[in-house]
Amino acid sequence: MVRRRPSGRRYTDSSRRHRAGVIASAIVAVIACGLLGVGAVAWSMPQLEPVKVLAGQPADLGRSPWFDSGTTVFADIDPAVKTRAADWGCRLTDGDSSARVLESTPDPDVIGTRVIDDQSLTPVVTVGPTGDGSSITCSGGRAETGVTMWALPTDAGLPRVALSLVIAGIALLGAAALMLPAARGLTRFGR
């Protein structure tokens, strides 16, 4: 009488742990690649160019990059002078011709000042993120005084969120490699 071996494969705790490690590693690697891709695309998007804003005339802004704080209007005024956004009378017109009045005043201590053409500029109106075909028109009392105004990116320097996504993606790729049992030299028992 010949004994037959069972047709199904028996799974031991070590082979279950091995399979779980491989699946977890694959999931983390896919998430890491997604973060790297989104971060790289966001990082490579061009920053908004400085745009001079003339009183009563629309100024084209362009599209904000992903995860960007958008645009702020800066003016050549004394930083000690406190103004409200309503004093500048700025309106943002989107590409679909919908307009909204900009009523948010930025905090100069958080955003800081900028210098263009040897003029120190103070933030006066928060615009925020913009889309394709966006333009801004400032025609309030302060804007009509002939003060130099510029629409500049709110955040100066490198895009922080995009950099964080790229770093997180690299870290997760490393974690995925450490989760993979074969990468650590571990194999299932009995192989």
Image (cartoon, rainbow, N blue to C red):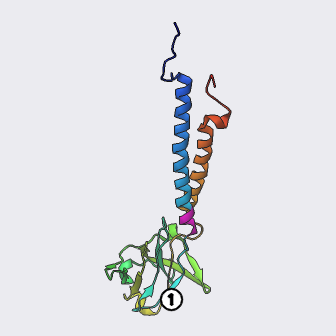
Q: Looking at the rendering, in which quadrant would you find the C terminus? A: top right
The number of numbered discs placed on residues in the rendered structure image is: 1
**Of residues 25 and 2, which is closer to you in this image?**
2
**Of residues 8 and 98, which is closer to you in this image?**
8
- Residue at the disc numbered 1: 148
| Callout 1 crowding tier (Cα within 10 Å): few <14, some 14–19, many ≥20 | some
Residue furthest toward the top? 1
**Of residues 48 and 172, which is closer to you in this image?**
172
Residue span colored magenta: 40-44
Residue 136 horizontal/vertical position (percent): 41, 83
Amino acid found under the numbered disc labelled 1: Thr
Can residue 75 be seen by looking at this rendering? yes
Residue 32 horizontal/vertical position (percent): 55, 50
**Residue visible at 46% across and 69% down in the picture:** 107
**Residue visible at 60% across and 47% down in the picture:** 173
Does the magenta-highlighted stretch encompass residue 34?
Answer: no
